[in-house]
């Protein structure tokens, strides 16, 4: 009781913690939290709005996601999609990863119309005389999305060297010589900023932290093709994955900066990739 005879409604206590988690403990909490939230989201148990809310609530313990605003949460999708794969802003429609788009297949592709992805041109099966002698980007224009390819030894070394530290900026290996030549770019280190990682995790919580190394490594150093982004100097690098989805990394390849800078990472199916290419 107070001197006024009642306990004020706004009375509260705040205690200083007895101990604070170490940086290593924070990383463990971060990985466990993000994995749990992503798993619940992918299972269709929680919505994108709830996922963002939970991530922000964990910011005191993880040291990340405090930048998620009330506006971000208010604008997030509150619907529960099939297996949690609801469209995520700002790039809707990254769901139904293994779908085959009827609009991509021609009337002559009877086997494709029967929904056999391995026989559909969008997956790049079989040869195409139109693509012979063309660059890989030109071949992609002819064949659509190609099939997964195994990296050579030099590419594999670069892929294996990708180890993203979520607590700081990361400098990654330089891009492949053949890709730089095709894009007419001079080689520079590739930079992934901590702020970009945090933003990407906010917008795409469906991507587990444990997959960042693999998805970035495949897109940058084992790409099937690339195409222009939404701004001048922005390039999308795309790699077809063994599970028939695609890893896409958008890179700002500025002539005036010391590094090529990763802008975002997404994982999407062929249909949405075709839609993105059509808008570029």
Image (spheres, rainbow, N blue to C red):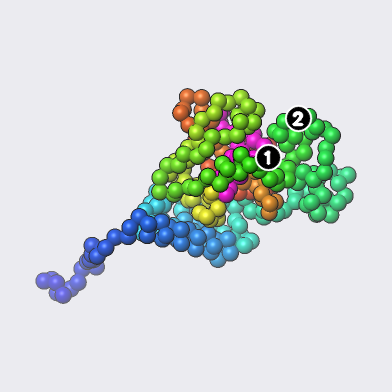
Left/right placement of residue 90 relative to residue 5 reads right
> Which x, y percent locates residue 246?
65, 47
> Which x, y percent locates residue 275?
67, 42
Q: Tell me the magenta residue range.
A: 214-237
Residue at 68% over, 45% down: 150
> Label for residue 134?
2
- Residue 223 belongs to magenta span: yes
Category of crowding for the residue at label 2, using alpha-carbon neighbours closer than 10 angstroms: few (below 14), some (14–19), many (at least 20): few
Q: Can residue 141 be seen in this view?
A: no
Q: Which residue lies furthest to the left in this view?
A: 3
- Front-lying residue, 57 or 226: 226
- Residue 33 belongs to magenta span: no
Residue at 63% over, 27% down: 181
- 232 is higher (above) or lower (below) than 82: above
> Which x, y percent locates residue 28?
42, 60
Residue 159: image quadrant is top right
Q: In which quarter of the image is the N terminus?
A: bottom left
Q: Mark 1 points at which residue?
A: 224
Q: Which of marks 1 and 2 is nearer the N terminus?
A: 2
């Amino acid at each position: 009781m107070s001197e006024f005879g009642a306990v004020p409604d706004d009375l509260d206590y705040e205690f200083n913690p007895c101990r604070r988690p170490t940086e290593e403990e924070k990383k463990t909490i971060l990985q466990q939290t993000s994995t749990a939230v992503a798993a619940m989201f992918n299972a269709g148990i929680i919505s994108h709005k709830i996922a963002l809310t939970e991530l922000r609530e964990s910011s005191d313990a993880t040291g990340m996601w405090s930048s998620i605003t009330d506006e971000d949460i208010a604008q997030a999708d509150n619907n529960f999609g099939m297996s949690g794969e609801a469209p995520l802003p700002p790039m809707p429609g990254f769901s139904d990863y293994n779908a085959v788009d009827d609009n991509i297949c021609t009337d002559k592709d009877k086997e494709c119309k029967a929904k056999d992805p391995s026989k559909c041109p969008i997956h790049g099966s079989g040869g195409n005389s139109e693509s012979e002698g063309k660059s890989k980007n030109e071949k992609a224009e002819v064949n659509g999305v190609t099939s997964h390819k195994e990296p050579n030894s030099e590419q594999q070394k670069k892929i294996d060297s990708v180890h993203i530290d979520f607590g700081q900026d990361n400098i990654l290996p330089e891009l492949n010589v053949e890709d730089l030549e095709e894009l007419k770019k001079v080689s520079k280190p590739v930079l992934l900023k901590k702020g970009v990682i945090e933003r990407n995790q906010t917008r795409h919580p469906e991507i587990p932290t444990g997959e960042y190394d693999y998805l970035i490594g495949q897109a940058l150093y084992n790409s099937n093709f690339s195409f222009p982004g939404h701004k001048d100097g922005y390039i999308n690098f795309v790699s077809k994955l063994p599970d028939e989805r695609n890893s896409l990394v958008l890179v700002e390849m500025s002539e005036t900066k010391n590094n090529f800078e990763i802008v975002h990472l997404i994982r999407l199916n062929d249909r949405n990739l075709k839609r993105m290419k059509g808008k570029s």
